[in-house]
């Protein structure tokens, strides 16, 4: 039966006839044998091919699978634990495909070698084995995840890639190197409550067996062996390139569990970035049952291939099963959904319900852009659809008002050039973009896209993430070439205050605390997208003195955390310490993380909203404490009311005079 490109009704009927609900797909270790089950209702014949753990070219045995209604069951002797396997599936025309088990919980080391037709090997491993390590302890966290969390977005490799290998026992860029470098003590030091890792699922365009750090000019364009992970290969397995031994299929499970356990011991939560809208190549699932797993008729695609058809029963089940696997076996504390706009509301609702039965406090958020093949009302889309499940939307209204839009790299934000429309968007962002907030007589951005949140739990406040320019690079690209280093640091500090002092969940790109930058490398992918800056403050000597907005497949020279920036005393004192203190202030006071709409309505009041002159003043009062935030986006000094009892806690300007809000500056003050 050819089901490629069939209509919606066909697949509804198909699901009714062939759906499978028992929770036993994938691999199970039973008393006397290993059991594999795969869903494929149309296959004529199925075999499991078993390969030597020492030689993937050596097929050591083949097992014939037994059809049980819509699934195929294979029993394999326990002696094959640690071996690798693939499925061989014949269709009605007696033609076969070699397939990767979509439920494989670990893979053999993979090297794509620029070939998108290669098929990975699943591993016959037991999640309950001692070899897989202990399940991590649970996070002891009693606060409101929807507003109290402060998230540090990090690629596993970036944290240590530019460290000195001679000073470390573990290979740079691995899970173990994060532990050796005390990641979780570090993030607590700068006020973070959670670490969000860029995708750690098995990715396709990697060579697991080569985790060498790539310095400047060591990339190889599309085959550069650095990968953000947005090219999924499998949704249950962990990327082998981050393990100390990719050849051992247990090792990646064990070391990721140990990493999470240490995070939870330190009181830090772990969020996984997951990519269920697309895969690297649709052959991965089409090899199993062509035409079922993807919306082949989609008019808009997340990448060059059609999106996953999350509305189909077995696709949705795969998504939810894999999320539950990480929530139960790894005690993951949250998930960030890449291009969640390609998922139906029902899918997000269903996975939310099931995940919160496992962990009621789990964090969920995603990219709810107006970029999807679905009707906007059929998905959770910012500015179109509300939600009552605390599913957060990345707030690009706030981001763009601060530093300028991502789609136009040279267009500035409020920190480099005043703009009345951006000012009003920022006003709207201060109370978390709540629809029902009463701005009274003050002007604000009232369009649906800016005023998008029916509940404060929906707002995910940020100014930079892995996509787009770092905050420092964006300032340097848009600022006048004559602006001094110290002045640009003050602009940076103002941007940080604009971000942290709004209501909602907070999010910060790794390295923001030290002026993280992504200097362009011509040897990596897409150097033509890099943008010129007149500045090279740290002598990084990038290609054409330009900086990268989309560094998903380039060298560690571009992506690694620039620890050398901390050698500059100005960065250490005026950026790193400032970030740490500002973040910790937010965490220890309730005023800028109010947990409900009603608290915000009661506590937050605007005092001055001067669109013409770019002056914004608001107050937040709670528990007999009153804090006042003052922003000046103009080029002249603004005099404000100040008494001897008042206390200035933070100023974006390094030198300032009480009672005077200097041009292009911000102040946080406790009013007595």
Image: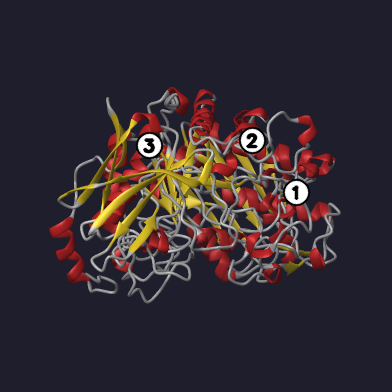
The structure residue drawn at horizontal position 23% and vertical position 66%, both measured from the top left corner, is: 92
Q: Reply above or below: 444 against 248.
A: below
The residue tagged 3 is 327
Q: Earlier in the sequence, mark 3 or mark 1?
A: 3
Q: Nearer the viewer, residue 429 or 69?
A: 69
Relative to residue 566, is residue 382 depicted above or below? below
Residue beneath disc 2: 190
Q: CA distance from mark 3 to mark 2?
A: 26 Å
Residue 119, above or below 249: below
> Badges 2 and 1: C-beta atoms under 8 Å apart?
no
Q: In front: mark 2 or mark 1?
A: 2
Rendering coords of residue 355 (x, y %): 32, 40
Residue linked to disc 1? 653
Distance from label 2 to label 1 (Cα)?
A: 20 Å
Whole-percent x, y for residue 349 in the image: 28, 51
454 relative position to 463: left or right: left
Q: Position of residue 173 (x, y in %)?
A: 65, 41
Q: In the image, what residue occupies the spot 44% across and 37% down? A: 83
Image quadrant for the N terminus?
A: bottom left
Can residue 431 be seen in this snapshot? no
> Alpha-carbon neighbours of circle 2 within 10 Å: few (<14), some, or many (≥20)?
some
Residue 326 seen by the camera? yes
Q: Are marks 3 and 1 in contact (CB under 8 Å)?
A: no
């Amino acid at each position: 039966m050819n089901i490629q490109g069939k209509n919606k009704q066909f697949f509804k009927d198909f699901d009714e006839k062939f759906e499978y609900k028992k929770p036993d797909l994938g691999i199970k270790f039973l008393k006397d044998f290993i059991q594999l089950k795969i869903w494929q209702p149309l296959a004529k014949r199925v075999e499991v091919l078993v390969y030597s753990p020492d030689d993937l070219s050596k097929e050591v045995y083949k097992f014939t699978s037994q059809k049980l209604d819509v699934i195929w069951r294979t029993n394999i002797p326990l002696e094959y634990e640690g071996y690798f396997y693939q499925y061989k599936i014949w269709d009605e025309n007696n033609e076969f495909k070699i397939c990767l088990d979509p439920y494989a919980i670990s893979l053999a080391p993979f090297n794509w070698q620029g070939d998108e037709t290669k098929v990975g090997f699943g591993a016959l491993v037991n999640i309950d084995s001692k070899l897989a390590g202990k399940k991590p302890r649970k996070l002891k966290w009693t606060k409101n995840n929807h507003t109290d969390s402060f998230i540090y977005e990090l690629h596993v490799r970036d944290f240590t890639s530019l460290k000195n290998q001679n000073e470390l026992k573990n290979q740079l860029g691995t899970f173990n190197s994060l532990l050796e470098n005390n990641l979780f003590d570090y993030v607590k030091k700068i006020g973070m409550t959670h670490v969000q890792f860029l995708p750690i699922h098995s990715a396709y365009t990697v060579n697991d067996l080569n985790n060498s750090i790539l310095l400047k000019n060591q990339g190889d364009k599309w085959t550069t062996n650095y990968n953000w992970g947005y090219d999924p290969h499998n949704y249950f397995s962990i990327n082998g390139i981050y393990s100390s031994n990719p050849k051992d299929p247990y090792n990646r499970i064990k070391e990721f569990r140990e990493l999470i356990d240490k995070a939870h011991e330190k009181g830090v939560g772990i969020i996984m970035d997951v990519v269920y809208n697309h895969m690297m190549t649709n052959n991965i699932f089409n090899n199993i049952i062509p035409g079922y797993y993807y919306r082949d008729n989609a008019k808009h695609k997340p990448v060059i291939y059609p999106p996953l058809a999350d509305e189909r029963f077995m696709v949705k089940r795969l998504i939810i099963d894999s999320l539950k696997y990480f929530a139960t076996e790894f005690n993951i504390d949250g998930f960030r959904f890449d291009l969640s706009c390609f998922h139906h509301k029902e899918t997000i609702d269903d996975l939310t319900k099931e995940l919160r039965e496992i962990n009621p406090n789990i964090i969920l958020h995603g990219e709810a852009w107006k970029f999807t093949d679905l009707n906007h009302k059929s998905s959770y889309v910012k500015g179109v659809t509300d939600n009552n499940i605390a599913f957060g939307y990345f707030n690009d209204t706030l981001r763009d008002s601060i530093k300028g839009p991502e789609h136009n790299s040279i267009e500035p934000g409020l920190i480099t050039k005043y703009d009345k429309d951006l000012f009003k968007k920022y006003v709207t962002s201060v109370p978390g973009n709540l629809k029902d907030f009463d701005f009274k007589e003050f002007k604000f951005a009232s369009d649906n896209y800016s005023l998008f949140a029916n509940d404060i739990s929906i707002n995910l406040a940020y100014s930079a993430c892995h996509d787009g320019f770092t905050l420092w690079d964006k300032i340097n690209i848009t600022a006048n070439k004559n602006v001094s280093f110290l002045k640009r640091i003050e602009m940076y500090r103002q941007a940080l205050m604009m971000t942290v002092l709004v209501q909602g969940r907070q999010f910060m790109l790794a390295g923001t605390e030290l002026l993280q930058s992504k200097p362009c490398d011509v040897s990596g992918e897409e150097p033509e997208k890099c943008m010129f800056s007149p500045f090279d403050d740290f002598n990084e000597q990038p290609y054409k003195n330009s900086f990268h907005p989309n560094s998903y497949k380039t060298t560690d020279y571009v992506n690694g955390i620039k620890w050398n920036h901390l050698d500059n005393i100005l960065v250490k004192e005026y950026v790193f310490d400032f970030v740490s203190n500002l973040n910790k202030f937010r965490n220890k006071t309730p005023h800028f993380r109010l947990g409900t709409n009603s608290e915000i309505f009661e506590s937050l009041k605007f005092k001055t909203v001067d669109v013409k002159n770019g002056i914004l003043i608001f107050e937040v009062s709670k528990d007999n404490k009153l804090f006042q935030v003052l922003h000046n986006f103009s080029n002249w000094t603004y005099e404000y009311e100040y008494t001897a009892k008042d206390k200035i806690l933070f100023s974006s300007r390094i030198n300032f005079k009480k009672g005077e809000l200097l041009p292009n500056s911000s102040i946080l003050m406790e009013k007595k």
